[in-house]
Image (cartoon, rainbow, N blue to C red):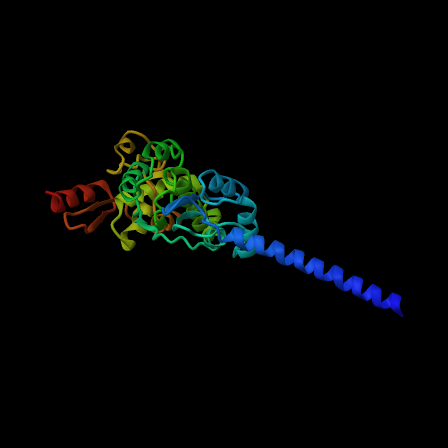
Amino acid sequence: MENNIDEIILKKTKINKINILLVFILLIVFLYSFLTAHNSNKEVIIHVGVGQSVDSLSQELRDINVVKNDFLFKLYIKLLKSGPGIISGDYLIKENTPVWKIALQVGRGRHGIEPVKVTIREGLTNEEIANLLSVKLINFNKDIFLTNTLDKQGYLFPDTYFLYPLDDADEIIKKLSNNFQNRIKKIETSINSSGKTLSEIVIMASILEGEASGKEDIVIISGILWKRISFGMALQVDVDQSTYNIRGLPQKPLNNPGLMSISAAINPVKSDYLYYIHDKNGNVHYARNFDEHKRNISKYLK
């Protein structure tokens, strides 16, 4: 009987010691977590790159003294994140922010900074996009953007984006390129059944951006231009003067077309027309043959 009592007392003693140890450990973690996160009384902005790992981010934050203990930071990320990974973008870290709160911010996308709204309209060239981004983003490197998009004109989707001041050129390129891929996936069946390659469609769409003025005329002009190609004629479009001297499509897209132009390039409307002009008011006038075309020029453009 006494042995049983001794065993019970011994077990309780061990449990109490374990509990005390756990409390002690939790207390240390708690105190560590509420230590000042970074240097005294200064707000800092940190940047989390697209696809950046928790390990590399924790190392960066420790190196610049934003967090004092990267183990705790990684632990809190695991406990507090809302998805499979940390969320990219810029984050404002206020003075005396504890490590758990920093982990909560980057784990759940609580940036503390308003993103910059950038609208890239249809038909802009890479150069024009770079100029726009240079005005909107203080950290943007135009030269890197242009160098890394030499083969991407036509495939940077025009849209409204919400970017962060420290987003670098490659991250922005990735966002624009991924948006293009996502949009194209939705019309992939139409592209495959059109009998044309994606490259041909994008090049034609880039021409239509400069040649058409609305939903009504863009599909008809698309039909006219594809017809000229089928007839072996030069396209002779004002948006690209080289098309007066060569036959077929230009080698590369002239700009970055939007979805309406891409759809029109895929789905041209057949007509009897072979020529068209836009008058000074933007109204389109079609012609079946060159004589009619010359009369339209004389009537509407002189």
Farthest residue in the top direction?
A: 245
Question: How many numbered marks appear?
Answer: 0
Residue 299: horizontal and vertical position, in percent?
Answer: 12, 46
Q: Quadrant of residue 248?
A: top left
Left or right of residue 239, residue 181 in this image? right
Which sits in the foreground, 93 or 253?
93
Residue plotted at (27% across, 32% down): 244
**Above or below, comparing residue 255 to residue 37 in the picture:** above
Residue 7: horizontal and vertical position, in percent?
Answer: 83, 64
Which sits in the foreground, 7 or 103?
7
Which sits in the foreground, 25 or 38?
25
Q: Quadrant of the N terminus?
A: bottom right
Farthest residue in the front direction?
A: 2
Q: Is residue 271 visible?
A: no
Residue 261: horizontal and vertical position, in percent?
Answer: 34, 48
**Above or below, comparing residue 32 to residue 129 in the picture:** below
Q: Is residue 235 visible?
A: yes
Q: Quadrant of the C terminus?
A: top left
Left or right of residue 52, residue 228 in this image? left
